[in-house]
Image (tube, rainbow, N blue to C red):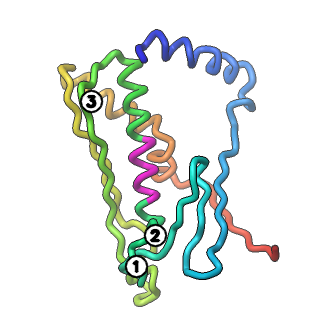
Amino acid sequence: MDVTALRALQAPLKDKYREAPDAAVITLKARGELDDQHIACKVETGRAIALAGLHPATGGTGAELCSGDMLLEALVACAGVTLKAVATALEIELKKGTVRAEGDLDFRGTLGVVKDAPVGFKAIRLSFDVESDAPQDKLDTLLKLTERYCVVFQTLNVKPELSAALSRG
């Protein structure tokens, strides 16, 4: 897709959202079913069922997906798509590219071994390796705009309002 096709695709949406801001607010949803045989959750991905379970560092076998890995995978997917869209909009040719995310977890927190150990990622690093003939200032802009417009990056960067509820099914 080139910049003209991208703009043609997005222009009517941008116009619609300028005229009716509420139309731009959409609730995305995820759903999972608890596995009745294992400590696992079957998550509907829209394409298949992903079986998430305990990480080996918390007693899992490693056969199921780890939700921490899934979070990093979502970040990589979102950042990769955003980078490509921004590069297209800025007319930066990317010959090749790789997106990586890695995060540091202290499993003592998740297992309740130490009360002051954090539960969750202490640090997440996102990196891009690209092959491009674009000048460095354009690549710097590409990174800046990718950070700005990547939904998952910004969700992690600026904590959203969170809530949890439990009800009897």
Say whether disc 1 or disc 3 marks the residue closer to the N-terminus. Answer: 1
Main secondary structure found in the magenta portion: helix
| Dot 1 and dot 2 residues touching (CB under 8 Å) | yes
Q: CA distance from mark 3 to mark 2?
A: 38 Å
Instruction: Please name which of the two marks, 1 or 3, marks the residue nearer to the observer.
Output: 1
Q: Residues within 10 Å of mark 3 (few under 14, many from 20)?
A: few
Which residue, given by chain and number where applicable, does mark 2 sit on?
64
Task: Give SS at disc 3.
Answer: helix
Looking at the figure, which quarter contains the C terminus? bottom right
| Dot 3 and dot 2 residues touching (CB under 8 Å) | no
Rendered view: 42 above or below 57: above
Residue type at the position of mark 2: Glu
Residue 13 on image: x %, y %: 64, 21
Residue type at the position of mark 1: Thr
Residue 11 on image: x %, y %: 59, 14
Residue occupying the point 31% across, 27% down:
141
Task: Give SS at disc 1.
Answer: loop
Residue type at the position of mark 3: Asp
Q: Which mark is residue 79?
A: none
Task: Give SS at disc 2.
Answer: loop
Which residue, given by chain and number where applicable, does mark 3 sit on?
140
Q: Which residues are magenta?
A: 70-78
Could you say which is closer to the camera, residue 113 or residue 98?
A: 98
Could you say which is closer to the camera, residue 157 or residue 30?
A: 30
Instruction: Please name which of the two marks, 3 or 2, marks the residue nearer to the observer.
Output: 2
Rendered view: 167 above or below 29: below
Side of 81 relative to 47 (left or right): left
Which residue, given by chain and number where applicable, does mark 1 sit on?
61
Residue occupying the point 43% across, 26% down:
85
The image quarter containing residue 80 is top left
Q: CA distance from mark 1 to mark 2?
A: 7 Å
The image quarter containing residue 60 is bottom left
